[in-house]
Image (cartoon, grey):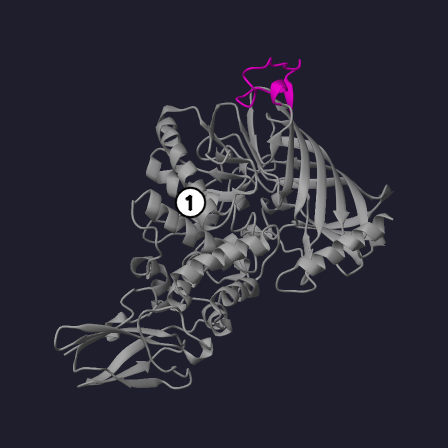
Amino acid sequence: MKRILLLLLVTSTFITAQNNTSYWQQHVDYTMDVDIDVENYQYKGTQKLVYTNNSPDDLKKVFYHLYFNAFQPGSEMDLRLQNIVDPDGRMVTNIGAKENPVYESRIAKLKPNEIGYLKVNSLKQNGENLQYTIEGTILEVTLNTSILSGEQVVFEMEFEGQVPVHIRRAGRNSEDGVALSMAQWYPKMAEYDFEGWHAHPYIAREFHQVWGDFDVTLHIDKKYTVAATGYLQNPQEIGHGYEDKTKKINLPKGNKLAWHFKAPKVLDFTWAADSNYVHDIRIAKNGVKLHFFYKNEAKYKKAWKEMQPYMEQSLDFFNEHIGPYAWEKYSVIQGGDGGMEYAMCTLVAGGKTLGEIVGTAFHELAHSWFQQLLASNESKHSWMDEGFTTYISTLASNKILKKEDGKPKGGRSYRGYLYAVENQIEEPLTTHADRFNTNVAYSIGSYTKGSMFLTQLNYIIGEENTANTIKKFYNDFKFKHPTPNDIKRTAEKVSGLQLDWYLNEWIETTHTIDYAVAKVEGKDIKLARVGKMPMPIDITVEYIDGTSEEFYIPLNLLRGEKPTTATILKDWAWGNPTYTFKANKEVKSVEIDTSGLMADVNRENNIFKN
């Protein structure tokens, strides 16, 4: 009967999928009980994992990630640091001069009591012992019995770990002095989707994760305040700012507290702990509780207090411009080594000034939509989560912090992309995040060019259509794993225009946009496509008599036109490198794309003046 019910659920998922009639996704339910020793940074735990195979396939193997194993000399992460030309500065030491740097991997120098590790001591499937092997950060498990399509099985594990010296994202004793930043800290089931298993080694980039529910109990020194994914189930036995102050606190005896959290419909479980955290709570207009955890030090207090009302405003902005935040709690936690998004929380480093942290915090909160709700594959499509997050958080910052209009802008925000083009370091955004040739190419591609995908969409289909595309994307794909095709199809449905050419050219190639005003004689205007990538064109023409007129040239591949008040001309066929039209009066000047939203790599040839 259980399998029949599960198959019915799978069938229901098939029916409700938006752009793929065979859409499905796996599901996990974790129950973990973990004891932490804050003196030696080691921990032991048990894990019960209920795994539901919603796929149409029978699974003979499963894979787990053991992320902390990356922080060991000789690991793939270590070797990558030693061989990439521009290693992450947080992960290396410069043993050369500033002018002539020589980088040494920090991982390579870790001592046995400083490394990270995750060890699996036992693993069972439905009560029967399993055989498994470990290769670096991947645990490969050969199943005793295949997990049939629509079937649910129970894995039980005993594991132990050691928290590494803080080098990247997670670890002990961060630069800010936070004792424990606990991300990617437990054996975690790898994702299996329509492309198969995603059991990639941990090199330092981001993740593709399985939707699930978490029930986690952490036993830790009672002096430590814990900030975590999920809702604390026993606040009156904990205190530390979580308690209902109108009720009695019943702290248990002993040196440790048992922190019991539950987190529904999330991708991960992350926590941080420190014996010197301040814990503030701010309740937003929609009832969401915003929690803030930061070091109780004078150099941090002012900025972390100042940030709090801005975070509420950014929450309101994202709710309005994307869709409602899906949980009742969000925590901004001092920890980590920059900013990194997790389920229902973020780890943010620094905070000596407001400017040092507020922009990062906006960006990480926006990830609660573009990744934690719209869970694209960060490893394969880093431009979707980082780019879309950069786009919407930039709009929020412009509106809230800079008091601007909150509308998309090109110009200066495109400088990183133009730098990559000019220096010939750009790579296609179909490149796996770990496999970019340089870190700078990854960063510019994922954050800047990914953001420009949406910024330019305003130019191609119109501002209102783009805004509605984002909202429809949220409504159709929240709690799912959308792909690049899904954002393209959503924009097509909203605008009525065809955009396959745009996804292909902008994401799958490194073709550039370059249009020029080739010739102007009297009323005749000749334009040229110099770059390889085609686009629709907006033209501003100023006449000799002082009047002006806007023209719009649709691209034939669009099979339509965006909403515009401009004079619409005939389509420009992409295969034709030139386009000629006659204006209504004698021309004084011509300019292509006065909005600056089109990423033209050479704007000098966009203007003609008589």
Q: Nearer the viewer, residue 602 or 583?
A: 583
Please tell me how many numbered marks the rendered image carries. Answer: 1
Q: Look at the image and say whether residue 242 sits in the magenta stretch.
A: yes
Q: Nearer the viewer, residue 236 or 108?
A: 236
10 Å crowding of disc 1: few (<14), some (14-19), many (20+):
many
Q: Position of residue 9 (x, y in %)?
A: 75, 52
User: As drawn, which residue projects farthest toward the left?
Assistant: 545
Residue indicated by mark 1: 317
Q: Which residues are magenta?
A: 235-258
Amino acid residing under circle 1: Phe
Residue 403's place in the image compared with 142, above or below, is above
Residue 43's place in the image compared with 517, above or below, is above
Q: Which residue occupies 32% across, 85% down?
A: 579
Q: Look at the image and say whether residue 36 sits in the magenta stretch.
A: no
Residue 587 relative to residue 420: left or right = left
User: Could you say whether the residue bearing mark 1 is in a helix, strand or loop?
Assistant: helix
